[in-house]
Amino acid sequence: MKFTTRVEGDVVVIDAEGKIILGEGDVEIKQAVDELVKQGRKKILLNLAKVPYMDSAGLGEIIRCFTALRKSGGHFKLLSPNARVLDLLNITKLLTVFDSYDDEETALGSFS
């Protein structure tokens, strides 16, 4: 699992690559988001375009990130989840909780 971050205006985009599963990616995403929140970043877009699979542990960390940002007055949104991840979000009824976008330009524009 690899994470890279980049700044687009006042939004931090986290580009994830690999599976987000128990012991592989779940801890890394928590650490990345926690560090950004400590830096005062309030707008985070998680790019899932290169994430082929996510299990319940990965989903739990994404929920925790969403909650932590919401409590600090921030926003956490998803970009380009694949069909498998969308199914997981749909089955768990979390698709209605997360803002999810297919293209980056629209996602970035949604933060303003």
Image: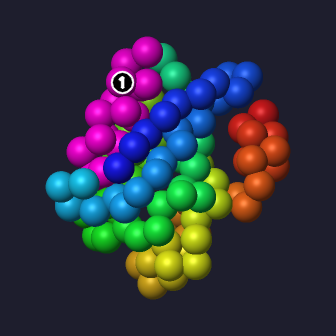
Viewed as shown, does residue 2 lie left or right of 44?
Answer: left
Tag 1 residue: 35
Does residue 32 sit above or below 110 in this rendering?
Answer: above
Residue at image coords 73%, 61%: 102
Viewed as shown, does residue 88 lie left or right of 112?
Answer: left
Q: Amino acid at mark 1?
A: Glu
Viewed as shown, does residue 103 lie left or right of 98?
Answer: right
Nearer-the-camera pick, 12 or 37:
12
Nearer-the-camera pick, 77 or 14:
14
Q: Main secondary structure of the magenta part?
A: helix
Location of residue 112 in the rendering, given as x and y in whole percent from the top left corner: 78, 34
Does the rendering let one see residue 46?
yes
**Displayed quadrant of residue 9:** top right
Location of residue 5 in the rendering, given as x and y in whole percent from the top left corner: 52, 31
Does the rendering let one see residue 75?
no
- The span shown in magenta is 25-39
Neighbour tally class for label 1: few under 14, some 14-19, many 20 plus, Cα within 10 Å: few
Nearer-the-camera pick, 112 or 48:
48
Residue at image coords 39%, 34%: 33
* Element assignment for label 1: helix
Location of residue 67 in the rendering, given as x and y in whole percent from the top left corner: 40, 46
Please check the rendered image and state whether residue 12 is part of the magenta-colored stretch, yes or no: no
Location of residue 96 in the rendering, given as x and y in whole percent from the top left corner: 58, 69
